[in-house]
Amino acid sequence: MHVLVVEDDQVLSDAVTGALRDHGNAVDCLSSGADADRTLTTDDYDLVVLDIDLPGLDGFEVLRRLRKRKSKVPVLVLTVHDAVFERIQGLDSGADDYLTKPFKMGELEARIRALMRRARGVADNLITIGRLTVDAQSHLAAIDMIPLYLSAREFSVLQMLSTRAGRVVSKDAIMRSLYDWDEDVGPNAIEIHIHRIRKKLGNSGVNIRTVRGLGYLLEVVNEPSKIPSDAA
């Protein structure tokens, strides 16, 4: 998942960014509303964590401009104010959720999971594809309840493909979801992740297919039927 964090409190920004990156997300950080507005005009994100009390252009205006451009990216608003009218203003401006500082990092992560479920149109954190289960809350994947031992980024790739199972996901989209904009990434990084995940999926009947020139597709493949040894 590719997340933009817009927060001028450096300590809080570092804490939120660190928590998101620990789960394999790519995170870009900005500290001003004007920079956020420019970036959101040109770049695509899966989620925006937006502070309201920004210097210059405040978060409300960033949000209004974002929605005026018809962007549907989920936005979680952060603020130190707990006034009802400000929460209403934020939601009316296009926020998807609202969190008052100070907050527990676990609550932030739970709200982000809820927003992403809503964006995907699913009811819970568990995705089942054939014999594969992917749990967004625990960051665990399993085949027939046997855990797959995945790195944070491998899990992120598998989660991204599983939420779009049966549809092609471009290499660029996977790249954006894994790596920050200033991160030095090798040309074969995605292929390496895909190769390792395929090996761990083994003969599970769930496969990541390369669609040449387009990207990757997670699918359930028909396993060969087992013929009894005493069959004629």
Image (cartoon, rainbow, N blue to C red):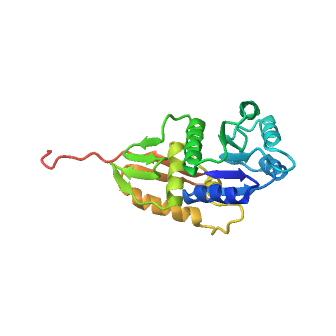
In screen coordinates, is 97 left or right of 121? right
Looking at the image, the residue that sits furthest to the left is 230
Q: How many marks?
A: 0
Viewer-nearest residue: 178 or 101: 101
In screen coordinates, is 42 left or right of 223? right
Q: Whole-percent x and y of residue 149? A: 41, 60
Residue at the spot x=67%, y=69% of the render? 184
Residue 21 quadrant: bottom right
Q: Is residue 45 above or below residue 14?
A: above
Q: Whole-percent x and y of residue 195? A: 48, 62
Name the image quarter holding the C terminus: top left
Q: Is residue 118 above or below residue 18?
A: above
Viewer-nearest residue: 104 or 38: 104
Residue at the spot x=74%, y=35% of the render? 90
Residue at the spot x=73%, y=40% of the render? 81
Viewer-nearest residue: 185 or 208: 185
Viewer-nearest residue: 119 or 97: 97
In screen coordinates, is 40 left or right of 118? right
In screen coordinates, is 208 left or right of 80? left
